[in-house]
Amino acid sequence: MKLIGVRMPDEEIAAIDTWTAQQDPAPSRPEALRTLARTALLTR
């Protein structure tokens, strides 16, 4: 696994944090980003 850095607008971070809070159990922010990216890539 490789480390990457990402700059994002506050609104996008807030949306990710809102999504994360709705999950059970709540993933960490990095895991949420991986999950959301994986889902987007698999559904395109």
Image (cartoon, grey):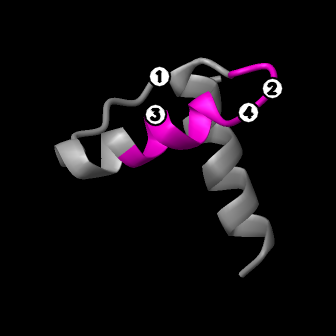
Q: Residues within 10 Å of mark 2 (few under 14, many from 20)?
A: few
The answer to whether 39 appears left or right of 29 in the picture is right
Element carrying mark 2: loop
To which residue does mark 3 refer? 17
| Tag in front: 4 or 1 | 4
Quadrant in the picture for residue 31: top right
Q: Residues within 10 Å of mark 4 (few under 14, many from 20)?
A: few
Q: Distance of mark 4 from mark 2, alpha carbons?
A: 4 Å
Element carrying mark 3: helix
Q: Which residues are magenta?
A: 15-26
Q: Distance of mark 4 from mark 3, alpha carbons?
A: 10 Å
Element carrying mark 1: loop
| Tag in front: 2 or 1 | 2
| Tag in front: 1 or 3 | 3
Q: Percent from the top left, x then y, of residue 3? A: 47, 22
Which amino acid, by three-letter code, is at mark 3? Asp
Residue at image point 19% right, 42% down: 10
Q: Residues within 10 Å of mark 3 (few under 14, many from 20)?
A: some
To which residue does mark 1 refer? 3
To which residue does mark 4 refer? 23
Which amino acid, by three-letter code, is at mark 2? Asp
Callouts 4 and 2 close, C-beta under 8 Å = yes
Disc with the residue nearer the chain's start (4 vs 3): 3
Q: Distance of mark 4 from mark 1, alpha carbons?
A: 24 Å
